[in-house]
Image (cartoon, rainbow, N blue to C red):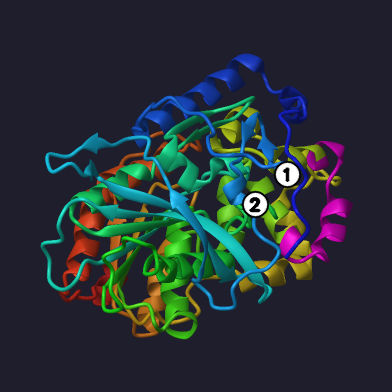
């Protein structure tokens, strides 16, 4: 494994210094609008939060939040992908006592399991498994939903498993909201078990999170499904159907896992995958993120890819100025809320030595083009039915590239259900156009995937693509 991350303190670069001379009033208004829009769209529960768990002598502190010692990977890992490394009970931040004495929505277990990273090396990944209290009323044994969270950030305190325990985490300059908990609870209410992956390096303290790395996130999601079968108290069987669910970063992870499953995890009984707003073509997605409320995500991408391929560090160093280098360091410990407030609406021109946007630098660097081409999702055929959803007004994770993923899969003969969400423009680059389809389509997405878990057949609508927006 990579060397252990250095302890992350709350001392960061002074945020205003990173944004040049944009007018304070206008900038503050846009940041507030983005923050309010995100909170309103996500409808997150504001449960008081604190990082809990026994912290060992090598505990990591990320922006004032102590990461439990559980998240420190051991020196040696099991050989089989999906093997459990360790588990412990996970108290859910939102739960109720049931009439039969069992907690609602279920019993949660914190996980660490073995996966394989993009370089083919073993890696420890953390996450959570929830055994539902509700009975499964569909066909067959209790199924499993492997849930890939949307963008949470790059700091360990942003890990989805921690957000299940603390739906709202506030530290020294950090804010993390577990907005995908809503979808998890809806599946649990239907009687499906849920496993959530923290992805590679998000939570686990030995490396940075490799944001939107298709192999890392696809493997982590499939291996989470494998690990869930071995959790003590799990009612899953080898024949339990598995569904993949994700939106935004999670949509990319679900899409990647769906097309990797036949070769990487044929033992996972995949029944279907929902990929909402998938970032399938990072070259195009980076253009949408640049200058948006989520501009900090550029830092997460660069940090992650430079960690995976150290040869990129020379290119990054040569093309970033002092402000850019400081921003990359700053974003490495940020969650979404921090990134919006610290780097929202920043143009990548402010970070580059040449004053050119990152898109222009990528276009001039064959090595960078090669790296991003390797991240393209849609080059393999999923064996299970897939549902691709994209908002036509999405200006963060572009509509055209998400639609192209559906076209690519259709051309390979996959069973694709494509849905274009038609909504008015709800505000340029402030996340509303990206988040609104998450809410408006969530019920349909859950129903579609639940049907697959019940064994109902999906009918492809690839024939309609020529007339679909």
Residue identified by numbered label 2: 72
- Which circle marks residue 58 in the picture? 1
Kindly identify the residue that appears in the image at 49 percent across and 52 percent down.
397
Which contiguous range is marked in magenta? 307-325
State the quadrant of the N terminus: bottom right
Please tell me whether residue 106 is drawn above or below residue 463 in the rendered image: above
> 188 or 272: nearer the eye?
188
Q: Earlier in the sequence, mark 2 or mark 1?
A: 1
Q: Position of residue 94 (x, y in %)?
A: 32, 35
Q: Position of residue 5 (x, y in %)?
A: 75, 49
Q: How would you rate the neighbour count of disc 1 (Cα within 10 Å): few for under 14, some for 14-19, many for 20 or more? A: few
State the quadrant of the C terminus: bottom left
> 156 or 414: nearer the eye?
156
> 393 or 412: nearer the eye?
412
Please tell me whether residue 469 is drawn above or below residue 188 in the rendered image: below
| Callout 2 secondary element | loop
Please tell me whether residue 13 is drawn above or below residue 295 in the rendered image: above
Magenta-drawn stretch, dominant element (helix, strand or loop) = helix
């Amino acid at each position: 494994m990579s060397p252990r991350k250095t302890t992350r303190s709350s001392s960061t670069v002074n945020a205003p210094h990173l944004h040049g001379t944009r007018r304070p009033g206008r900038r503050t208004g846009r940041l507030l609008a983005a923050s309010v829009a995100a909170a309103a769209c996500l409808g997150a529960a504001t449960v008081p939060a604190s990082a809990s768990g026994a912290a060992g002598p090598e505990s990591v502190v990320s922006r004032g939040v102590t990461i439990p010692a559980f998240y420190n990977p051991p020196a040696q890992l099991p050989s089989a992908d999906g093997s459990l490394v360790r588990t412990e009970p996970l108290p859910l931040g939102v739960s109720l006592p049931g009439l039969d004495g069992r907690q609602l929505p279920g019993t949660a277990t914190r996980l660490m399991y073995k996966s394989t990273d993009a370089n083919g090396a073993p890696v420890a990944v953390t996450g959570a498994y929830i055994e539902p209290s509700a009975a499964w009323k569909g066909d067959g044994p209790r199924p499993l939903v492997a849930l890939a969270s949307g963008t949470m950030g790059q700091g360990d305190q942003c890990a989805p498993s921690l957000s299940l325990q603390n739906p709202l985490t506030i530290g020294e300059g950090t804010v993390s909201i577990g907005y995908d908990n809503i979808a998890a609870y809806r599946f649990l209410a239907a009687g499906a078990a849920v496993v959530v992956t923290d992805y590679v390096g998000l939570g686990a303290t030995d490396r940075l999170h490799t944001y939107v790395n298709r192999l890392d996130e696809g493997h982590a999601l499939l291996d989470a499904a494998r690990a869930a079968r071995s959790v003590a108290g799990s009612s899953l069987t080898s024949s339990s159907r598995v569904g993949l669910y994700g939106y935004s970063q999670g949509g990319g992870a679900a899409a990647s896992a769906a097309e990797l499953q036949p070769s990487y995890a044929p033992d996972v009984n995949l029944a279907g995958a929902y990929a909402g707003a998938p970032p399938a073509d990072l070259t195009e997605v980076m253009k949408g993120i640049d200058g948006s409320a989520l501009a900090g995500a550029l830092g997460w991408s660069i940090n992650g890819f430079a960690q995976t391929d150290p040869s990129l560090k020379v290119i990054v160093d040569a093309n970033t100025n002092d402000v850019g280098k400081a921003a990359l360091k700053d974003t490495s410990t940020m969650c979404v809320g921090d990134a919006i407030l610290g780097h929202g609406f920043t143009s990548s021109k402010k970070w580059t030595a040449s004053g050119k946007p990152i898109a222009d630098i990528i276009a001039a660097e064959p090595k960078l083009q090669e790296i991003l081409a390797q991240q393209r999702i849609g080059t393999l055929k999923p064996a299970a039915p897939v549902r691709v959803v994209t908002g036509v007004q999405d200006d963060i994770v572009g509509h055209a590239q998400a639609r192209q993923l559906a076209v690519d899969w259709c051309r390979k003969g996959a069973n694709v259900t494509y849905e274009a969400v038609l909504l008015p423009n709800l505000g340029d680059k402030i996340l509303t156009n990206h988040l609104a389809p998450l809410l408006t389509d969530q019920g349909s997405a859950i129903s579609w995937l639940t049907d697959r878990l019940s064994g109902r057949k999906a009918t492809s609508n690839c024939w309609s693509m020529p007339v679909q927006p």
